[in-house]
Image (cartoon, rainbow, N blue to C red):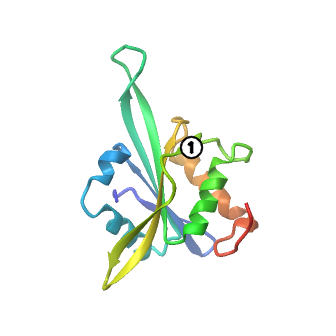
Amino acid sequence: IPSDASATSSSSSSLFGISTILLDMETFWRKDNVLQTMAQFIAENNLKMLGLMFTYMQKAEDGQDSEKPCRQLALASTDRDELERLVAFLMDDGSDIVNLQLSKQDEVSEEKVMMKDSISKLYVIQMDQHNSAASRKQVAPAIMGFWKDQSHSWGERSEL
């Protein structure tokens, strides 16, 4: 996890950490021990969720030599249900938050990682973010908006 990773708090407990990575997601996942490092970062910082924002340049489709910025978002948590509710919240075009224009690359995956003498589960979802103008300054408040609504409070269950 890059050194720019930061934890964002709501009241007295840390809810999520977010980091910007200047690579495409596919290249990042090929690195050694990525999932274990993510799980360790979540545990050491007492986080509910970790967001990884990927930013990279891709050749534009206009036939020119120009490049366009592309963004992707991965979210990881030890709580699958809460992760799925957060994803639904972020993908809701009718919400009051900035429209990130997210599309899932796949459904939530369950990853098993070794943590100090035991195996832990880490749930991860990978998404493309088609609104490339939405940076960390827009994404972090959007994620915080999920917990501001008491019906989405961590640990409480609500119907979608």
Q: Please tell me whether residue 78 is drawn above or below residue 144 in the rendered image.
A: below
Q: Quadrant of residue 55?
A: top left
Count of number-bearing discs:
1
* Vertical order, 109 against 59 (above or below): below
Q: Residue furthest bottom?
A: 117
Answer with left or right where residue 19 lies relative to residue 13: left
Residue 21 in percent (x, y) is at: 37, 49
Q: Residue at 50%, 59% (x, y): give it.
A: 108
Helix, strand or loop status at disc 1: strand
Quarter where residue 2 is shown: bottom left
Q: Nearest the camera: 24 or 15? A: 24
Relative to 85, is 149 on the left or the right? right
**Front in this rendered view, residue 139 or 59:** 59
Residue 1 at x, y percent in the picture: 34, 59
Depicted 116 relative to depicted 55: above or below: below
In this picture, residue 60 sits left or right of residue 101? left
Mark 1 nearby-residue class (10 Å; few <14, some 14–19, many ≥20): many
Quadrant in the picture for the C terminus: bottom right
Where is residue 146 drawn, in percent x and y? Answer: 66, 59
Give me the residue at 46% from left, 44% from top: 72
Residue 140 point in image, percent of width and height = 56, 53
Check the image and name the residue furthest to the left. 32
Q: Which residue is mark 1?
A: 102
User: Could you tell whether 145 is left or right of 102 in the image?
Assistant: right
Along the line of sight, the residue nearer the viewer: 114 or 14: 114
**Outermost top residue:** 63
Identify which amino acid the numbered label 1 is placed on.
Answer: Leu
Residue 96 drawn above or below residue 145: above
> Residue at point 54% right, 71% down?
79
